[in-house]
Image (spheres, rainbow, N blue to C red):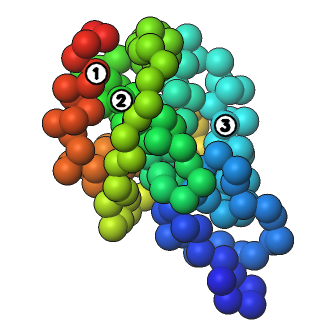
Amino acid sequence: MTENNIICPGCKLHLAYQQLAPSERYNASGECLDLFNQLADRTFAFKHPDFHHQLSVDAYGAQHAGGVSRNIITAYALIGLYLALEKNYTGRQVQHVHSIIPKQSWEKLEPPATTGALTVQDVLKATTEEELYAAMKKWAQAVWDSWSAHHAFIKEKTALYI
């Protein structure tokens, strides 16, 4: 952190320091989490029947792994990205798969050095619902691609439930 800026530990985004408390769920600065909450407000407002919001939850979760983020959050985020991006599952379908995975202990997946060039801030630049979803997909794809070292593991774990 500099005097007037903070660097999010998850996505490395430089943001104006607003003295917001860091996330208790994600490896994220409070300032970055505030942007995610703004995105959540927008995705919920659209009330899309496919529940596009799930894609943003999974992209953000995978991009902000490590630190205080629990292993299950990272695993579920990556499972969600895999299903949405490679299997064309809707957000509702991803939620269903998440709901049928039995409680278990997830191993720690070491985050990549960089988790994609796009961040929640880039997504928020979209103005229409269609632009927003397209930006979310680009962001999610960049994050998923950055986790390529763990793709085989995620696909293997997910195969039991799809």
Q: Position of residue 77 (x, y in %)?
A: 44, 36
Report the residue marked by disc 1. Answer: 158
- Mark 1–mark 3 distance (CA, rounded to whole Å): 26 Å
* Above or below 118: residue 47: above
Which residue extends farthest bottom?
3
Locate residue 88: give its quadrant. Answer: top left
* In-image side of 91 versus 84 (left or right): right
Report the residue marked by disc 2. Answer: 79
Q: Please state which of the two labelled residues, at mark 1 or mark 3, is closer to the viewer.
A: 1
Q: Position of residue 148 (x, y in %)?
A: 21, 48
Residue closest to the eye, 117 or 75: 75
**Dot 2 alpha-carbon crowd within 10 angstroms: few under 14, some 14 to 19, many 20 or more:** many
Locate residue 140: give its quadrant. Answer: top left
User: Mark 2–mark 1 contact, CB under 8 Å?
Assistant: yes
The amino acid at mark 1 is Thr
Ranked by sequence position, the earlier of labels 1 and 3 is: 3
* Above or below 91: residue 79: below
User: Mark 2–mark 3 contact, CB under 8 Å?
Assistant: no
Locate residue 80: give its quadrant. Answer: top left
